[in-house]
Image (spheres, rainbow, N blue to C red):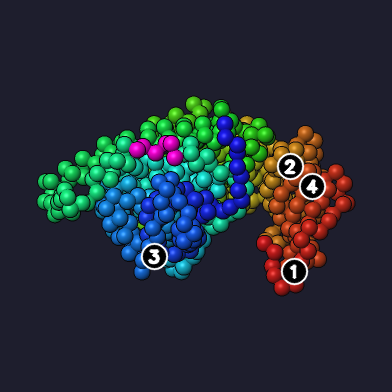
Amino acid sequence: MAEKKFITCDGNYAAAHIAYMFSEVAAIYPITPSSTMAELVDEWAAQGRKNIFGETVRVVEMQSEAGAAGAVHGSLQSGALTTTFTASQGLLLMIPNMYKIAGELLPGVFHVSARALAAQSLSIFGDHQDVMAARQTGFAMLATSSVQEVMDLAGIAHIVSLKARVPFLHFFDGFRTSHEIQKIELIDEAALTAMLDRDALKAFRAGALNPAHPVTRGTAQNPDIYFQTREASNKFYDAIPDMVAEAMEKISEITGRTYKPFTYYGAPDAEHVVIALGSVTETLKETVDYLNAKGEKTGVVTVHLFRPFSVKYLTAVLPQTVKRICVLDRTKEPGEAGEVFLDPNKLSDDGTVALTDMSFSKDGRWFAYSAAASGSDWVEIRVMDTADKSLAADKIEWVKFSGARWAPDSKGFYYSAYDAPKQNAYSSKNEFQKVYYHALGTPQSADRLIYEDREHPLRYFSAWPSEDGKWLFVIASEGTSGTEVLYKRVSDPKFRVLLPGFDADYSPVDCKDDRLYYVTNRDASNYALMKVDLNRPGMIETVIPESERNLLE
């Protein structure tokens, strides 16, 4: 095995390094954050650096991105392996030529540092709007998530494009990857070069425009012919997933890092899986490690081959135990309906039922919502299974000024309710609100009483459990301002007063390591963040002091 070599570089450098190896011509026009790729290729060409064919890349800078795409198109037709680099609006200017390049089955490669498009304003950061706008052009799309992945996988775009006769768009996150500097392993150039299909290269050159054997291209066709020829291209795209998988298997052998069209990371028996592409997957992997260390069963699928999208290779890496899949998308498409989870307008035929509160269980399995009819303060809590949106049998009545607060184990929730009115529900006086715990799958009559105050009939109460399941808090109020916080270990029989009063507001934020973090306006009209040691309630510390000018929220 060849000795490993390491370099310190950013994503743009890694992409330019690979592109230079496999290119004979580079048509460029700078646009942030892709400009560095073009600048590096131009610099290396000026220095006489050689590509894998022993030639110096010919670099031509055009007057716009549209001109650069046109130059790529013409260069590919002449039989030269050609690439370009762009982002954002620049990619959109290339789209007309991208249709032609794909339609004529030319093996070009575009390297894109993905970026938001200028809409209500310009942004040089952001998302995947630009590459998503190119989905329909016919380019295969390969995504990389880190600087190392750019180095390892960018060559696949060049290698498979030539073999498949389909152009590739290789993209990675602008700035987040394009400008992130990392120490990475330099891929073995000889091993990567050996993967190039020389027969496909010979066939590509033989098909170039040449006055010695003229051909007719770029004709006009009537619908009966046009659509047949469009459909005739399907076989080229159908072959790409297997070609990419084969190339990634060889790259895995070269680098020692496992690559597939879709790569899975996480628990082999994961029940909750996130699917995403781009640099976010690096953060998701750390999140998966954190959650799985706490006993969760989670995983993440990194999308590499985005187009053509292969269901076969996606399902091959998904654990058989998966129950829920969340797909993270990073593009804005105005007017797209998306999936409606719950439409409050359909809670009643006449539109008089309103949604007043909602919450998901910690495991994401259940969704509890509160609905009020005809403008009443009385609400009914219902529970929905998020998997199929079916309503569970659970129904909680006589709830007012409260919603569902899920327990950490997701097996039930806390709520506040009154005894059922003995007379008219809309005219009866409401006194002695109580806090209950409802276990899923049980009737309301079986709910466990958690807290009641028989001395103060007009107080309101709400439960607030800590996420570690050790502590339970009850926030009491007598009106629209002023609260009191009571607490107990879940295993203890009685509550104790933690933050007394009603002359100040206390809003719990988090509970960690037996310390409650809360926001209060006690001696701080603009609010301050405090923490109190639950084992030593007298130990109160300031975390974020009150600001003289800004309100803490």
**Residue pointed to by mark 3:** 61
Kind of residue indicated by mark 2:
Leu
Q: Residue at x 35, y 38 (%)?
A: 198
- Tell me if 522 is positioned left or right of 230 in this view: right
- Mark 3 falls on what kind of element? strand
**Residue pointed to by mark 2:** 472
Kind of residue indicated by mark 3:
Glu
- Tell me if 168 is positioned left or right of 294 in this view: left
Q: Is residue 419 magenta?
A: no
- Mark 2 falls on what kind of element? strand
User: How far across and how far down the image is residue 125, in percent?
Assistant: 51, 61
- Tell me if 222 is positioned left or right of 73 in this view: left
Q: Residue at x 21, y 41 (%)?
A: 231
User: How far across and how far down the image is residue 276, in percent?
Assistant: 49, 44
Labels 2 & 3 near each other (Cβ < 8 A): no
Of circles 3 and 1, the one toward us is 3
User: How far across and how far down the image is residue 230, in percent?
Assistant: 21, 45
C-alpha gap between disc 2 and disc 1: 30 Å
Of circles 2 and 4, the one toward us is 4
Q: Is residue 197 magenta?
A: yes
Q: Nearer the viewer, residue 341 or 59?
A: 59
Where 360 sits versus 40, above or below?
A: above
**Residue pointed to by mark 4:** 515
**Residue pointed to by mark 1:** 547
Kind of residue indicated by mark 1:
Ser
